Structures are given as structure tokens and as C-alpha cells.
Image (cartoon, rainbow, N blue to C red):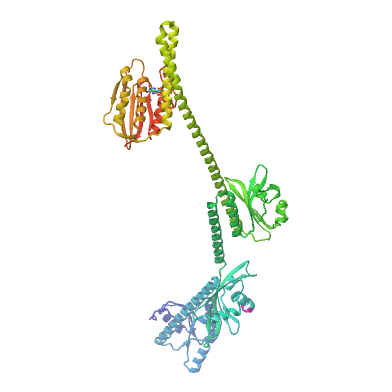
Amino acid sequence: MTGEGSESLPVLLVEDDVEERWLLSEILRSRGHTVTVCESAEAGLDAYREGLHPLVVLDWVLPGLSGRDFLRAARSLPHGKRSVIVVVTGKEEPTVLREVLDAGADDYVAKPVDQGLLNVRLTIAEREVRAARERERAESELGRKRREIQALFENLDEVFFSVDVLEEELIQISPAVRKVLGYDATELKEDPALWRRLLLPEGRQVLDRVSDLPDGESLTLEHSIDGSATPGTRWIEVHLKPERNVDGRVVRLDGIASDVSERKRSQEELASRNRELLTLHRISELTLEAKSLEQAYDDILGEISRATGFPIAAIETYDSVRERMVISAARGIPLPEDGSSLAIPLSETLTGLVIRTGRPVVESDARTRSEHGHRALRKLDLRTYLSFPMYVSGEVTGALTLAHQEVVPTDARLVRWGGSLANYLATFIDRKRSQEALRESEHRYRALAERLQEANQELETFAYSVSHDLRAPLRTMQGFAHTLLSRFGDELPEEGRDYLRRIVASGRQSEELIRDLLTYSRLSFEEVQVRPVDLNEVVQRTLEQLEADLRDAGARVEVEEDLPRVQGHSSTLIQVLSNLASNGIKFVPEGRKVRLNIHQEDRGNRVRLWVEDNGIGIPEDQQEKVFDAFERLTQTQTLPGTGIGLAIVRRGMERVGGTAGVQSTPGEGSRFWIELPKA
Ligand code: ADP
């Protein structure tokens, strides 16, 4: 039979008697075990030494070494206590059994071996082996857990500790103390002054504060330590929880201490970032409100000086022509009283280095530097001197300088901040300068435009009155020329009559010119009231005006019916249309029959009225030019005209809020258009 739940064990059997040995080994094998059989205690010990046999069945009486000798020797081995040893003994007397058990056996079986009894004993032994193995496993598991917890405690960023208040003794402290505070637990326990400084910096006061705490509450303290054991300043946060006795007196403090330097640093970093942003914000407000650069400089420097804690602050502009820095705005540096600026040669100021290298200068004792040589600067007795380049489009155009008569700390943060302030100022100054320049040129432009307009007005008035005044003497001249020709023509030779005819023709031409000029200038300054106008009527009246010319030219005129109403000015539009139509009659090649087509094009809320002819056309590059005054194409120079007709068209359309233009194919004809809003 096999034992309940029995597992196969390596079993050592030590028995000198052949039969017993056979019997015992059979029984053990039948229980599923692997049996190492030895005939003597010596052989048994050799086998036992080699490996662990969790179960040993041992004969008590042996030749040579006895069962007792085996027991003693086996138990003294490192693994000797971990085996269950069952002794097989011949005598079942109490003294012998006592002896067996005292020698270290776990159990015994009497000879002659009763199989049933032996199996019971073996079952018990196997159970013990199992129990022992489980115990071992549990112990090693416990050990592992203990080590894990130990490691955890050591790696924690928090130190747990307890202080006996009455004895003023640090009772316990977790191993993380080495990592967090830089000391060992024992070191601390032995040095009350040290642990008090590190864990309870306020000393007795802490006790008072803790005593006053309501039940269940804890106290949180924060302090800095300049540890010799750890580099630099560290911030330690301590939570303290009091334990009271029955009288309510605090007898013990349980605490957790942690290093919060990182958090503190990020908080400080955040706070200074906020301060920096706030300053930039204030500066940008000041710059927006400022009317001029000078006014802004003063306010900005005040703000910068206040925010950075530097009583001396200056904006220096680099004068590249004369190789010097010009300080036109400063806090803490006296400037000339006449309002002019302080100019310092590049070689006499540390700011010169900023200009040369394009990098900031950070100096803790300016007095020792030869570059800091200018009298005005020397007088200030400056120690800390910071100067940051101001870049505009990649070039250093000046510097922002901060200075102090004391040696004050200048950390990387301050340098970074100074740099961004300088950059901001550079951008601002650049923008402000271009704004001012823009405003200046706008101002000049407007003044110029006004003067130009005035001059134009004068010129137009002058042209108008000149044309007007020319008319009367011209008419008189023409009248006399006519009279001369009709009354004394016969008395003159042909040549004389020819001269007279030319005078009359030139007179007519001059009159036309004067008429056109007058029309043109009248259009410029006469008031034109735009109102709804019927285009049908405008076209009709234009054609009536031109009736004789059209007839003479034998022109065929097609007009679209039902033209719309537009916003315009009737007589101006008639003038415009009649100019276009008469050009259409005039500029036609010899022998071609004149055809005019007047029609509309709907362009949403505007209307185009087209005047198309089949004349000589206008080359592409001349199509805009023909609208200028006195502009006449070469091929038409011999034809009558003043060159003002189309200028009148442009000006007229401008005055009524419309536009005019032309499309043309030379040789085939021109398509002039005017465009107006619908009424
Ligand atoms: P004018 O007709 O008195 O010469 P305009 O200002 O009316 O002056 O026209 C300027 C020039 O534009 C004309 O001299 C002519 O060369 C050209 N032009 C105007 N209208 C036409 C047209 N319909 N066809 C061809 N050329 C034209």
C-alpha cells in the first residue's frame, strides 16, 4: 500500500540483516520511494553525506558504528536536521526507546517488523517530511518577502520615523533615510542634535504645535537643509502625527519625511516664469499705450528695473558709423540735462563686447574690467553688469543693460530672462520705428497730395479762364477774317485769299480746342448730381445732336431697344456718348460705309453700354493711352480733332460714378464701352 498523498522520496535504508533489509526495502519501494540500501552505518553515512534523504530508516544494532553513532554524525551535518529518521530497534523496552529518541530519532519501529505497524509509522514519517518541506518553503517565502519589504523601504522616497517624546529619542527610522537625508539610521539615532535638525527643525516649538493639534490631525512642516552629506540645498517636508497617552500628553511622534526639492524647484521655476510673463505683459501694455518711443522707453525701463531688481537699466543703441553706444533712455544713469543722450565709445563699455560678439555679457565685478572704462560709467561704481544683445533682422542693433552697485546673484534663469526681454524690446523698437516712419511718410504724402490738388485746381481754374477769355478775341479775329474775305476777297490775289482761308480754318480749330478744353475743365469742377437717367433718352438725344454729321457720313446706326435706366447725369452722358459716336464716324477708312451699333450688356447691378464702330481700330498698346488728354494716334493726325474727346469721356464717367474702356481689333473696328450702376 502507498501512503495517502505520498510522494516519491529518496529514502536511505541502513540495515545489516539480509531478510530485514529485503523486507524493509520492499515495503519502502511499494510506497513509491526510491531506496538507497546500505548494510552498515559507515556506508549509510557516506550516502547520507552525498545528498539529502528526507527519510531515513535506520537499524539500531549494527556491526561497527551503531545506529546511535549514525544519528549523531548525521544530525551534525548541515542538512542533518532536515531528515525524518525512523529507527528499527530489536527491543521495545522503555529505556532503549528513550535512548533512541534522545539520540535524535524521530520515531521507532520494533523488530520483528510488523508490516501493518511499519506502514502506519511510515505514513506518519512521510507526513512529517511533507510538513517539514512546507515549513521550509514558507520560511524561504517569508525571507524573500522580508527582503522585498526591506528593499522597498530603502528605495522609498519617504522616510518613516518615530520619536519618543519623553525620552527625546529617535526610536526607529526607515532605511530610506540614507537615500533621502544622506545618513544611516544608526548615525542619526546616536546624534540627537542631527536628527532633530533634519526631522524636527523647530525643536520644542514643534512639540507645542503638535500638542495643540486636534485629535487625529497631523502637522506638515517644510524646511531647507544645507546638507554636508548631500550636495546643495534640499527641501524636506515632514508630516508629523502625535500619539498621546491617557492624559492626552503627546508621548510619541510618528513622522514621514520626504525630499521635496524637485517640487520646490519646479514651483519656484513656475513662479518666476509667471513673474517674467507678467512683466512682458506689462511691457506690452506700456508699448501699446505709448505715443512715442521715448515715452515708452522710460516706462519700460521702470518696469524692467522693478521686476528684475536691478536699479540701473538702460537701452543702448549701437551707432555703427561712429562706433559707439548711445544711451538715450536709462534708469539710474544720469543723462545730460539738456535732454541729449550719452554716447560711449564701443571700447569704453562692456556693452561693446555684446555688439562685437552678439552674445550677452555677465560680469560680477565690472570695476575690474578694462573695457568698463568710460568716466560716466566708472562714476557709478558698478559691480554686477549684465548686457543683452537686441537683434533686428539678424543684426545687433543695440543692447539692454542691467547693472547693480552690489554683487548680486546672476543665475541662468536671469540671463535667459534678460535675453528674452532684450529680444522683445528689439522687436518692439523696430515695430515702433517703422510705424513712426510710416506715419511720417503718410503725413508727407498727404501734405503733398493736398498741395498737388490745390495746384491742380488753380491750374484748372486758370485754364478755364484763359480758354474763356481767349474765346472773345478769337471770335473777333474770325469775324474780321470772314468780313475781310467776303468784302475784299475779290481785291486780293489768290494767294492772299488762301492765307485768309487758312486763318479762318485755324480760328475754327482753335475754337474747337477752346470748346473742348472748357468742357473738360467744367467737368472737373462743376457739380454733377447723379440721379436715375433713362438710357434710351440719352442715346436718342445724342443721335439727334449728331444728326447732320451722321447724315454727311452716310452712317447706318443700330440701337438696341429698351435700354435700362441707370444712375448718371443726363447732359454728361450725352456729351460722353456723342464724343464716342463722333469718333466712330470720324475714324473710318476711306470708302468704308460707317456702321455704328449701340447696345447694352447686363452686368448684375451694373450696365455696360457699348458703342461699336467698323473704323480703323486702335492698336492694343494704345488702347489705354487714347483716354489721356491731347493723345492722338499718328495715323489720325491729319483728321480734325483736339485729342481731348476721350479724356472728356473718362473724366465724365468718373464724375457720374461710372467707368469707360475700349476693346479693338485694328483694321476692323473699335468697341468703346461705358459702365454705370443700374437705377
Ligand atoms: P480726337 O478725336 O479729337 O482726336 P479723342 O480723344 O476723341 O481725340 O481721341 C484720341 C485719339 O484716339 C484719336 O485721335 C484717334 O487716334 C483715337 N481714336 C478715338 N476714337 C477712335 C475710334 N473710334 N477708332 C479709332 N481710333 C480712335
Splitting the image into 4 quarters, where does residue 321 fall? top right
Q: Residue at x 53, y 42 (%)?
A: 438
The correct choice, above or below, for 188 with respect to 603 in the image is: below
- State the residue lying farthest toward the bottom: 94
Regarding residue 14, the answer to whether it shows in the image is no
Left or right: 388 in relation to 666: right
Magenta residue check for 189:
yes
Viewer-side residue, 6 vs 28: 6
The correct choice, above or below, for 241 with respect to 262 in the image is: below
Regarding residue 255, the answer to whether it shows in the image is yes
The N terminus lies in quadrant: bottom left
The correct choice, above or below, for 229 with respect to 334 in the image is: below
Q: Position of residue 234 (x, y in %)?
A: 60, 68
Viewer-side residue, 152 vs 664: 664
Viewer-side residue, 35 vs 266: 266
Magenta residue check for 37:
no
Q: Position of residue 535 (x, y in %)?
A: 30, 31
Q: Position of residue 383 (x, y in %)?
A: 69, 58
Query: What range of the chain is rendered magenta?
Result: 188-192
Left or right: 620 in relation to 48: left
Dominant secondary-structure state across the stretch colored magenta: helix
- State the residue lying farthest toward the left: 561
Ligand 1 occupies quarter: top left
Viewer-side residue, 334 vs 323: 334
* Total tally of numbered discs in the picture: 0
Q: Position of residue 391 (x, y in %)?
A: 59, 48
Splitting the image into 4 quarters, where does residue 440 fall? top right
The correct choice, above or below, for 429 with respect to 166 in the image is: above
The C terminus lies in quadrant: top left
